[in-house]
Amino acid sequence: MERTLAIIKPDIVATNRVGAILERIEESGLRPVAMRMLKLDRRQAEGFYDVHREQPFFRSLVEFMTSGPVVVSVLEGDDAIARYRKLMGATDPEKADPGTLHKLFGTNVERNAIHGSDAPETARREIAYFFGELDLVQR
């Protein structure tokens, strides 16, 4: 069983579409084993996205991620990282395949609705950023 981190971003929370994304995640066979809604402050967002600090989009990403509440969750399933990445689709909604979360819910490459870990090491780090072992529920 593999785990991955998923973030439903502020634009989706603000437009009351969290349930629609969670429904698609569960329909794909991935199971949430931890979940919470929170409002990231600047320090938290900068810490989470520190790997992108030198990128030109870092500042606008932090601004966006602190603009409203997000829903963070841990998804579990066989090959969870690859399966969730496939469900998400290409980061840029214009380049994403039909039916993927980015295509269905994203506005543009910066407001693309969701985040998902891209590798096992990243998933472990990202999950630990938001959740402790006691938060992860066996299902």
Image (cartoon, rainbow, N blue to C red):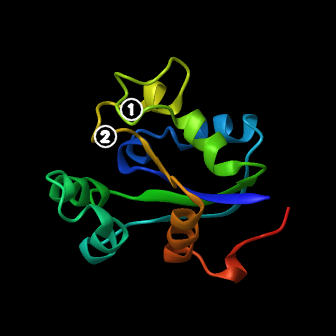
Is 11 above or below relative to 119? above
In the picture, the quarter occupied by the C terminus is: bottom right
Q: Which residue is mark 2?
A: 111
Looking at the rendered structure, which numbered label has been put on residue 106? 1
The reply to whether discs 1 and 2 touch (Cβ–Cβ < 8 Å) is yes
Is 76 above or below relative to 95? below
Q: Amino acid at mark 2?
A: Arg
Residue at x 16% of width, y 59% of height:
59
| Mark toward the start of the polypeptide (1 vs 2) | 1
Give the left or right position of residue 26, taking residue 87 as reference.
right
Percent x, y of residue 7: 49, 54
Percent x, y of residue 9: 41, 49
Q: Quadrant of residue 28?
A: top right
Could you say whether the residue bearing mark 2 is in a helix, strand or loop?
loop
Is 106 above or below relative to 85? above
Could you say whether the residue bearing mark 1 is in a helix, strand or loop?
loop
10 Å neighbourhood of mark 1: few (<14), some, or many (≥20)? Answer: many
10 Å neighbourhood of mark 2: few (<14), some, or many (≥20)? Answer: many
